[in-house]
Structure formats: structure tokens, C-alpha cells
């Protein structure tokens, strides 16, 4: 099960938090789920759905 | 709600955006706004869904959806107050590129937040390493980078922020004039939106905009359902990044799945050292632009229409630059090429609806100096008109802004000569620059400028090597060219050679002396269909107009034209040529 996560922007760091599927930058609030024990960040559950039923079957073995 | 109410509300929202645009055009100081119209005005509801837009720059509107959302997320909705104006131009917070300044004003009604008025405006100068910032290899060289900050707080100027901005720009007098125009447009939007809410009530407007978004979503989903399921891909290449003589691939795959469309850029080349990289916001804008060009034009344009579209832009590629990569021209050079690549893929689904590629560059020509008549510093930005690609039933348009920035236009000769110490020596269409086809690509234009005062200039374009391709046996259009002539010299020479650059399409920070001249030749566009099938009379008309040379008529269209002053078709020779019996083939 995924969950929403809120973070504070740390102005001492570069913004380098991206959606695992679409590549959009994630700022303060984003969707988190796990895949093979690794925490993956997404814009929303919709991006997670596409990651699982489009991206992984198509590119998963290559990555 | 009834269709009449929905239509009236939709049109009122469109008109609010148009009013903003007119305010901006009439009151801004720089020619990039009052002549070239390089800005966009949109309205969002409080959930940051786009509910109103008008005929502005397509790529700006697409990225505004992200910019405003990220802006509000960063500041927090609870921190907005009536009378606030927020400014923001960070490419790594949703922006299309650094010169694009997004300003937003919350609109309150009866003490409650209704939504946001937004103006996205392309500033000529941002305090980059040179005018244009085209040498940038990272964002820090592109100019002053603003995270979302309040420019006006509860109606009062935040003077410290103004001081920082004005101190960093080369022409603060222009900046303050343009910022006041932007703020004025936001006030106009606020006033007109409140009038709309007074007329209908907030509940009706919220209901109407929700229904309009649902209608747009359903229209888009039904368009996608008409597409055959499957995957359609296309590749196009950028000439280079200004540093390395290496072409950069844009690969796109359209995936049609039921009523959703995935635009997948997996396979696109890694990001470049030079500033051709597109931000995620620029890529989204270019994608939305392509979608709207080939799908149902009757749908109200709002956030609903984009719901069935999903964009995958791998991070660290030229379609989604990773921090701190440079991206200052990604929006207006790579963006149009992204749109073109998607249209190339769409040509496999909708051959009847898709045009061949356009010139796809604004041919950015920026200059900075001190006017000898006034002693004032000036900065200017001139476009050059490209050709638009031919379609199944039409020739392409001549000398217009790149499709991705379709509303942007050239600053007229009279204004160029009045505002800047520059003489426009020539402006005309480029013969044979429209790709031959059953329908011919639109022609590009060329301009020659003579400098009447010392000026620092920068130029950035593409399509010098990789020209706009033709569709369905149509041929490619003419490529970009750039020439320069120093004072006293008789002939123009390749600008790259004169300034010791092996890549002649991208020059920056060059000092022009009084009497020097620059000649800009924009790229044309692709043809559609076999040129051999073009009607003979149309070829004759093109030769009479000077659009096509007699040589191209024979070589590309297999049509022989005779006569030096009064052109006529040589039917016998043409019949031989088109039947393959002519001696020329």
C-alpha cells in the first residue's frame, strides 16, 4: 500500500527528488510505495499504476 | 448546468484572459511584449486547475500548469493573502526556462480564495553571463533565479525583492516597466473575475468550470478511443548544443491504450552540455501543443483536456534536464522539435490531420547596447519567421512564429528602427525554402540588419544541418543560415567562420561595430505528398510569385516553365518530364 508523504524544502540542498515514472520534480507532497524493498517516489497513485502496468513490463528487465 | 450557461461562463473566462493580454500589450515597455507578444495569461481555480486561457503561447500555457501548482505547493496555500503577487522563474520548479517569469495573484471573493490569475512572460534579459545566456552550461549562468517569492504583499511592494531583481538585470528601466504591466494585467483579471462571480455566484461558477473540465476530458478520451490501439514512434535530431558538433536525438513513442495516451520519451539522448535541454515543464508544454494541434478543436481548453495524457520524460535527458544543467533555449529550440517529433508519430495515426514539420526555431537574435540618441541602455529580441509545414489539403503558411510559440511575431521594421540603433536593410521571403510537395511547405523569411551603434549580440538557432523533413513523399524544406559582414567588406561570409566558431548557428556575446551587418535566413518547412502530383498551375503561380525558382520547378516538381517576364508552362516538356521521358531525369 502506498502513502502520501510531506517533506519540508531544504534550501541548503538542490531539489533532486523526481517521480520514478514521469520524471517530474517532486516538491513537498508526493506518493511513496515500495518495490523490491526500495522506496519509490511518484507524483500520485496514477503514476504508480502506470509504472507497474506500463513501465515495468516494458523496460523493467533492462533497468 | 444548461449548455448556454456553460458556454457563456467559458467565453467570459476566455475574455478575462484576453483582457489581461491587451493590458499587457498596451502597457509593457519592451518590444518582446508589446510587439512580439511573448507572454500568456491564464486563470486557475483554487485547486490549481486551469479553467481559462486564450490565444497565447502554447508552450507557456502548458508549463504554467506545473509552475503555478509547484509555486503554491512551496509557499503553502495558507500563506496567500488578498493583494499578494508572487513571482517565480525557476526552471527546476516547473518553469519552462529561466527567462519565463510566472507571476500569480490570488483572487478572493467574499473573503474566500476563489483561484489565481497568472501571467507567464518571457523577459529578454535576466542578468545572464551575456545577453541571452546562450553560453550557459549550468543554470547558475542563465541569470537571476527566483524561487516563488512575494513581489507584492497585501498590496505593498516588497522593495527588497524589487531591488534584487532590478540590480541584476542589464536594463532595469525595462524590467520595472514590464513588471508593472504584468501586475496591471493581474489586477484586470482579478477585477473581471470578481465581476463574473458577482453575476453568477461562486457556486455556479465552480459547478460550471467543473462541468467544462469534465466535458473537455470526455472529448479528449473519445478522440483517443478513435485511435487504433498500439505504439507509434518517431525520432528527430537537434543539430548540436553549441559546443559539440554532435546531433541530439529526441525519441518519442505514442502509446494508445483505450482512452488514455502515453507520450514516452524513453530512448532520448542524455542531456547536453549546452543550453538546449528542455525542462520537464517545457516538454509538457510541447506535448500539450502537439495534442491540441491534431485533436478536436471544439473542446474547451482547460485542465480536463489534459487528464487522459501521461508524459514520461526520463530525467537527465534533453527532454528533462537534471539540476543544474542549462536549459535557457530548451523551451524555444528543443520544445518545437519535441512538438514536431510527436506530430511525426501522429502522422502514422492521423495522416489527414498532421502537418509536415515547421522551421521550429524563433532564430533568437538578442542585442544589448546604449542608444546614441538618448544615452539609455537598451536590450532587444527579434525573431525571424519560419515556414509552417504543408498539410494534406493546404500549402504551409509563410514566415510565421514557430508552431510551438505560434502567437509570437516579429517586431515590425518601423519599431525596430525607432527603438533601437539598427537599420533594417532587407526583409523578404526566401525562395525555395518551402519543401516541395503536392502541397508546398511555407516559406521562411530573411532579414539583414545594420548596426548604427556598438552592440553586444547573441544568436541561437537550429535546423542548419538537419532540415525540416517532408511527409508522405514530400521533400525537406530549406535550412537556417547566418551571415555577417564587417564594415567596409563587400560580401557576407558565414558568421561562424568570421567569429572562429565551428558551429555557426549559435553565437554569443559578440561585439558588433558601427556599420557591421548581420543576415539571418530562417529555415522553411516540409512538403506534404509527392511534388510530382502538384497541380501545374500552382507551380506556375509559385514561380510567378517568386516562391519557387524555375530550376526548382523542373528539378523538384517536374514542371518546365518558359518565358523571362511572362511565365508560361511548357506543356510538352512538362509531359515528358512527368512521364519520365524528359532528358533532365
Image (spheres, rainbow, N blue to C red):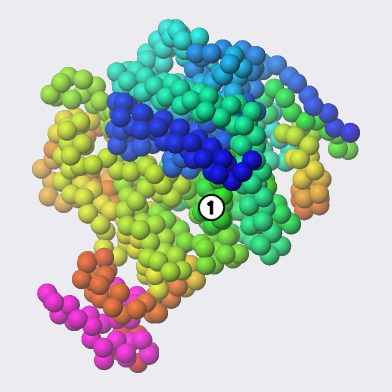
Please give the name of the residue rendered at 43% of the width and 69% of the height, measured from the top-left corner. B393
Can residue A18 be spotted in the picture? yes
Residue B503 appears in view: no
Residue B227 placement (x, y as % from top left) = 66, 62
Q: Is residue B554 magenta?
A: yes
User: For the residue carrying disc 1, how many other residues have a C-alpha within 10 Å: few (<14), some (14-19), or many (20+)?
Assistant: few
Q: Residue at x 52, y 53 (%)?
A: B297
Residue identified by numbered label 1: B298
- Identify the image quadrant of the C terminus of chain B: bottom left
Residue B85 lies, with reference to residue B403, above or below; the image says: above
Q: Residue B259 location in percent, x, y?
A: 71, 54
Q: Nearer the viewer, residue B37 or B23?
A: B23
**Front position in the image: B231 or A58:** B231
The x and y percentages for residue B193 are 50, 27
Q: Secondary structure at mark 1?
A: loop
Residue B11: image location, x then y, percent: 49, 40
In which quadrant of the rendered view does residue B368 lie? Answer: top left
Magenta includes B296? no
The magenta segment:
B551-580
Location of residue B467 by image quarter? bottom left
Q: Residue at x 46, y 47 (%)?
A: B404
Amino acid at each position: 500500500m502506498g502513502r502520501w508523504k510531506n517533506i519540508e524544502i531544504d534550501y541548503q540542498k538542490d531539489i533532486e527528488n523526481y517521480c520514478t515514472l514521469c520524471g517530474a520534480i517532486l516538491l513537498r507532497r508526493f506518493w511513496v510505495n515500495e518495490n523490491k524493498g526500495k522506496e519509490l517516489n511518484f507524483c500520485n497513485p496514477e503514476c504508480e499504476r502506470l509504472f507497474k502496468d506500463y513501465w515495468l513490463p516494458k523496460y523493467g528487465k533492462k533497468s | 448546468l444548461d449548455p448556454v450557461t456553460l458556454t457563456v461562463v467559458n467565453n467570459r473566462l476566455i475574455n478575462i484572459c484576453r483582457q489581461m493580454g491587451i493590458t499587457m500589450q498596451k502597457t509593457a515597455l519592451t518590444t518582446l511584449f508589446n510587439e512580439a507578444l511573448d507572454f500568456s495569461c491564464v486563470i486557475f481555480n483554487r485547486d490549481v486547475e486551469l479553467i481559462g486561457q486564450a490565444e497565447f503561447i502554447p508552450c507557456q500555457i502548458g508549463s504554467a500548469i506545473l509552475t503555478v501548482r509547484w509555486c503554491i505547493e512551496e509557499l503553502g496555500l495558507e500563506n496567500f493573502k488578498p493583494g499578494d503577487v508572487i513571482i517565480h522563474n525557476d526552471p527546476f520548479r516547473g518553469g519552462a526556462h529561466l527567462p519565463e517569469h510566472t507571476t500569480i495573484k490570488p483572487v478572493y471573493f467574499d473573503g474566500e480564495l476563489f483561484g489565481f490569475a497568472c501571467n507567464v512572460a518571457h523577459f529578454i534579459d535576466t542578468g545572464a553571463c551575456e545577453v541571452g545566456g546562450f553560453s550557459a552550461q549550468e543554470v547558475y549562468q542563465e541569470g537571476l533565479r527566483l524561487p516563488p517569492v512575494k513581489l507584492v504583499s497585501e498590496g505593498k511592494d516588497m522593495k527588497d525583492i524589487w531591488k534584487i531583481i532590478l540590480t541584476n538585470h542589464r536594463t532595469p528601466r525595462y524590467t520595472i516597466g514590464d513588471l508593472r504591466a504584468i501586475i496591471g494585467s493581474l489586477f484586470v483579471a482579478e477585477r473581471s473575475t470578481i465581476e463574473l462571480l458577482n453575476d453568477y455566484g461562486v457556486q455556479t461558477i465552480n459547478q460550471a468550470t467543473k462541468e467544462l473540465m469534465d466535458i473537455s476530458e470526455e472529448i479528449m478520451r473519445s478522440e483517443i478511443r478513435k485511435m487504433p490501439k498500439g505504439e507509434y514512434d518517431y525520432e528527430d535530431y537537434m543539430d548540436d548544443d553549441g559546443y559539440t558538433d554532435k546531433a541530439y536525438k529526441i525519441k518519442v513513442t505514442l502509446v494508445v491504450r483505450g482512452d488514455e495516451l502515453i507520450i514516452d520519451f524513453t530512448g532520448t539522448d542524455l542531456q547536453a552540455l549546452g543550453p538546449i535541454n528542455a525542462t520537464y515543464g517545457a516538454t509538457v508544454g510541447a506535448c500539450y501543443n502537439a495534442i491540441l494541434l491534431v485533436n478536436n478543436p471544439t473542446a474547451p481548453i482547460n485542465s480536463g483536456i489534459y487528464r487522459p495524457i501521461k508524459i514520461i520524460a526520463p530525467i537527465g535527458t534533453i527532454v528533462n534536464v537534471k539540476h543544474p544543467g542549462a536549459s535557457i533555449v530548451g523551451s524555444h529550440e528543443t520544445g518545437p522539435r519535441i512538438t514536431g517529433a510527436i506530430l511525426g508519430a501522429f502522422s502514422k495515426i492521423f495522416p489527414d490531420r498532421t502537418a509536415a514539420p515547421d522551421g521550429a526555431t524563433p532564430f533568437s537574435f538578442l542585442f544589448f547596447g546604449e542608444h546614441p540618441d538618448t544615452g539609455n541602455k537598451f536590450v532587444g529580441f527579434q525573431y525571424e519567421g519560419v515556414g509552417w509545414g504543408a498539410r494534406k489539403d493546404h500549402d504551409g503558411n509563410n514566415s510565421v512564429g514557430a508552431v510551438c510559440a505560434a502567437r509570437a511575431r516579429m517586431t515590425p521594421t518601423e519599431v525596430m528602427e525607432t527603438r533601437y540603433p539598427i537599420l533594417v536593410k532587407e526583409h523578404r521571403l526566401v525562395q525555395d525554402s518551402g519543401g516541395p510537395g503536392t502541397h508546398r511547405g511555407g516559406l521562411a523569411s530573411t532579414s539583414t540588419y545594420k548596426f548604427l551603434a556598438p552592440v553586444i549580440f547573441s544568436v541561437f538557432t537550429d535546423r542548419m544541418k538537419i532540415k525540416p523533413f517532408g511527409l508522405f513523399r514530400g521533400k525537406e524544406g530549406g535550412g537556417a543560415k547566418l551571415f555577417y559582414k564587417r564594415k567596409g567588406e563587400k560580401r557576407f561570409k558565414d558568421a561562424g567562420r568570421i567569429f572562429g566558431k565551428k558551429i555557426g548557428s549559435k553565437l554569443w556575446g559578440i561585439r558588433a561595430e558601427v556599420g557591421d551587418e548581420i543576415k539571418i535566413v530562417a529555415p522553411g518547412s516540409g512538403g506534404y505528398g509527392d511534388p510530382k502530383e502538384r497541380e501545374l498551375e500552382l507551380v506556375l503561380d509559385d514561380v510567378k510569385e517568386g516562391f519557387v525558382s524555375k530550376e526548382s520547378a523542373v528539378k523538384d516538381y517536374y514542371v518546365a516553365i518558359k518565358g523571362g517576364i511572362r511565365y508560361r508552362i511548357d506543356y510538352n516538356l512538362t509531359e515528358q518530364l512527368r512521364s519520365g521521358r524528359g532528358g533532365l531525369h
